[in-house]
């Protein structure tokens, strides 16, 4: 199957894992079919990791944090995979190609696997591939899957919809900075971590922490988990252990309340519905007859000869 040894992949062989990911990322129809067959065979071996989403504005020290966090987890005997969801191109300042060079020490570790996302295509496409890559990493025995997003708009929602725990990194900057974070992101976050709490910024980090703690009390009251606000210095690898302890506490509480598996089931169900929409859209575009009909009906809608509902209904009936 495309030169992939599934037994070796399940033993953690990185070459076979990389090959399987390349297959998943391919746009060729025969590769897609082969990738799905591979995933179906590996599915019983997936789902045993903790999936952590990490976001933050540019300059917050995301790569430094992920490297410090990853190295700490490896010390604890964990195998760590880092996947990036980045719809932007390297030219436009995305972090795709930079990640591996910035996480130099982590990428040299035998227990780590870093995979940047493909740079082309829509966010949905990138996120879709990341979900499948995550399953492959789980089959290869990775205990912690970190999914990093560049922290721009929609990518945060995409990542939050595929992870167990969503962590937002912030800079020590109290007061007005609170207005700068989107309320929607606060609602997604399971924790905020104030990074760069070192040197002269230690007191400022404490103030910022207090501000966000107050903000969280206004947001969520009834959930089984109250989002926590911690501070750390990724540069000095300080308080990284507290962050991992907090994630473990969350995982335990979520499992005790049966929310952990419930959340994953919901995510899978939403993913299936999303794929269904994408596939229908693709099927519509593939038929020349339907394409021609769509163009004609679109003109009728624009000129007011036909309602949008009626046009859509005609296209679906034709399909």
Image (cartoon, rainbow, N blue to C red):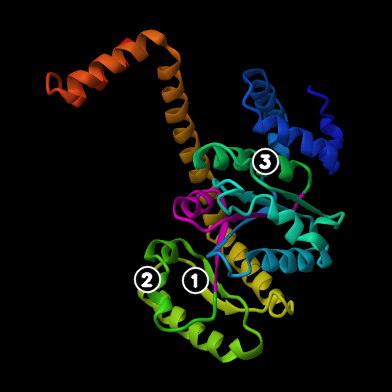
Q: Is residue 65 left or right of residue 169?
A: right
Residue in the picture at 47% in, 85% down: 210
Q: Secondary structure at mark 2?
A: helix
Considering every residue shown, the one lying at the far front of the view is 91
Say if residue 144 shows up in the picture: no
> Mark 3 and mark 2 in contact (Cβ < 8 Å)?
no
The magenta segment is 142-170
* Dot 2 alpha-carbon crowd within 10 angstroms: few under 14, some 14 to 19, many 20 or more: few
Q: Can you identify the residue that label 3 sits on?
A: 133
Q: Is residue 156 found left or right of 246 in the rendered image?
A: left
Residue shown at 30% from the left, 17% from the top? 294
Identify which residue, 180 or 253, lies in the foreground: 180
Expressed as whole percent of the image width and height from the top left, the position of residue 308 reads 20, 26
Q: Residue 186 appears in which quarter of the rendering?
A: bottom left
The crowd level at tag 1 (other Cα within 10 Å; few <14, some 14-19, many 20+) is many
The x, y position of residue 112, in whole percent, is 80, 54
Q: Nearer the viewer, residue 299 or 80?
A: 299
Residue sitting farthest toward the left: 305
For the N terminus, give its image quadrant. Answer: top right
């Amino acid at each position: 199957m495309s030169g992939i040894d599934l037994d070796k992949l399940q033993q953690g062989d990185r070459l076979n894992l990389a090959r399987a990911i390349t297959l998943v990322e391919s746009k060729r129809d025969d590769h897609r079919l082969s990738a799905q067959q591979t995933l179906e065979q590996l599915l019983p071996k997936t789902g045993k990791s903790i999936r952590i989403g990490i976001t933050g504005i540019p300059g917050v020290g995301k790569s430094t944090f992920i490297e410090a966090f990853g190295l700490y987890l490896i010390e604890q005997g964990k195998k760590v995979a880092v996947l990036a969801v980045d719809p932007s191109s390297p030219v436009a300042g995305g972090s795709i190609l930079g990640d591996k060079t910035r996480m130099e020490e982590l990428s040299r570790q035998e227990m780590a696997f870093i995979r940047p996302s493909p740079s082309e295509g829509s966010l949905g496409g990138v996120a879709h591939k990341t979900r499948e890559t995550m399953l492959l990493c789980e089959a290869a025995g990775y205990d912690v899957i970190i999914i990093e997003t560049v922290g721009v708009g929609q990518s945060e929602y995409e990542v939050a919809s595929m992870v167990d725990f969503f962590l937002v990194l912030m800079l020590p900057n109290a007061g007005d900075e609170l207005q700068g974070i989107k309320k929607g992101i606060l609602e997604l976050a399971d924790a905020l971590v104030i990074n760069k709490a070192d040197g002269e910024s230690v007191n400022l980090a404490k103030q910022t922490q207090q501000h966000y703690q107050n903000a969280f009390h206004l947001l969520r009251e009834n959930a089984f988990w109250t989002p926590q606000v911690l501070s750390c210095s990724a540069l000095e690898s300080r308080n990284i252990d507290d962050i991992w302890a907090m994630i473990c506490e969350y995982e335990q509480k979520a499992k005790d309340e049966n929310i952990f598996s419930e959340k994953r089931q919901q995510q899978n169900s939403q993913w299936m519905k999303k794929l269904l929409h994408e596939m229908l859209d693709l099927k519509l575009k593939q038929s020349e007859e339907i394409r021609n009909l769509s163009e004609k009906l679109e003109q009728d809608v624009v000129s007011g000869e036909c309602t949008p509902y009626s046009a859509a209904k005609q296209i679906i009936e034709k399909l």
